Amino acid sequence: SFKPRIFSGIQPSGGLTLGNYLGALRRFAGFQGTGPETIYCVVDLHAITVWQDPAELTRRTRELAAAYLASGVDPEQSILFNQSQVPAHAELAWLFNCVARLGWMNRMTQFKDKAGKNSENVSLGLYAYPSLMAADILTYHATAVPVGEDQKQHVELTRDIAAKFNHDYGTEFFPAPEPLIEGSATRVMSLRDGSKKMSKSDPSDASRINLTDDADTITQKIRKARTDAEPLPATFEGLKDRPEARNLVNIYSALTDEPVNAVLGRFEGQGFGTFKPALAEVAVEVLAPITAKMTQFMADPAEIDRILGKGADRAHAIAHPIVERTKEIMGM
Ligand code: ADP
Ligand code: NA
């Protein structure tokens, strides 16, 4: 049996959104001190599967590290590092490229979404992304992976890769990690289109709330968010066919840590003229201190680099022996 260990990563591929925060980031600190070892990563090797301006990538790597720190990830209690500084990730990913099947990759919905109609002209790395993600998780023998709903399929693929490796080599070397997908904000949707997830790569800035947005910007974006003209119902059931309204209520519930029906109990019969300003207020209340702390950490990039460097040494100490053992099992 495997020692409980939590791993998760976020790409430094753009400004962080409220979706990243509620679905992933803000949950990470909460696992500290609960038993499992916690390992959190800036996954720059994933970011470069699409074009990244080099200077921007460096800046965003530090900004994401600052966001981890600002949301309570403590580099003493957790291992916090940048993926490309630990060679085990890329090395194990290659070994897994030779275990994973082409047909498995072809079923990945994120690749289809990101490649769109242009799939002949995207990088090979974008296609192999889930194999690298399996390596990220399994090079620590992680047993649990807190993520948003959009990553569920990739964690399942990680389990498939672990199982096939174990089966092919007649071993129990890799664990089957569990996705931890919890709460009312596992899939925060775009503010402009209730059928699309809120994403840092959406071309419309009005579609998302960024962790770096100031109070006025957050309030404006929520005021302009797409909704319908109906008043709020008494229970969540009444929001079934109202994706935009449901999204705003889910966000409110996640921000205040209240059950959705408790939120609706207070706003039942009210329109968005009342609900949106209330939502903007709680969003600003939660995000303003995070933004302020991020700014503080960003003022000292050398300190961020020092923290990431120390984290990389600790990560390497766990990951390297696991890759070495994997190669041995394979006869290398
Ligand atoms: P993005 O999809 O914004 O590029 P990443 O792929 O780096 O972000 O994902 C980082 C984490 O944030 C993952 O755990 C992912 O599931 C989560 N996440 C991303 N977007 C959302 C969203 N709209 N709602 C909830 N969680 C999300
Ligand atoms: Na994602």
Image (cartoon, rainbow, N blue to C red):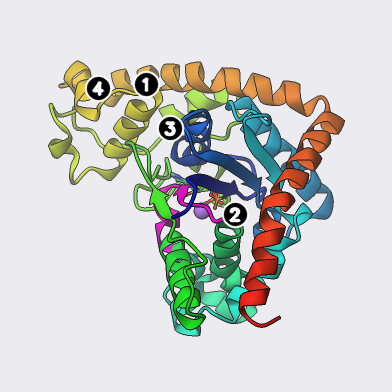
Q: In terms of secondary structure, where does tag 4 sit?
A: helix
Mark 3 touches mark 4? (CB < 8 Å): no
Q: CA distance from mark 3 to mark 1?
A: 21 Å
* Mark 3 vs 1, N-terminal side: 3
Q: What residue does disc 1 label?
A: 256
Label 3 residue near ligand 1, CB within 8 Å: no
Mark 1 touches mark 4? (CB < 8 Å): yes
Q: Amino acid at mark 1?
A: Thr
Q: Amino acid at mark 2?
A: Tyr
Q: What residue does disc 3 label?
A: 224
Front-lying residue, 298 or 85? 85
Disc number lying in front (3 or 4):
4
Packing grade of label 2 (10 A; few <14, some 14-19, many >=20) is many
Instruction: Please determine whether, in this image, residue 154 is positioned above or below residue 191.
Output: below
Q: Which mark is residue 144?
A: none
Q: Which mark is residue 263?
A: 4
Mark 2 touches mark 4? (CB < 8 Å): no
Asked if residue 297 can be seen in this view, the reply is yes
- The magenta region covers 140-153
Q: What residue does disc 2 label?
A: 140
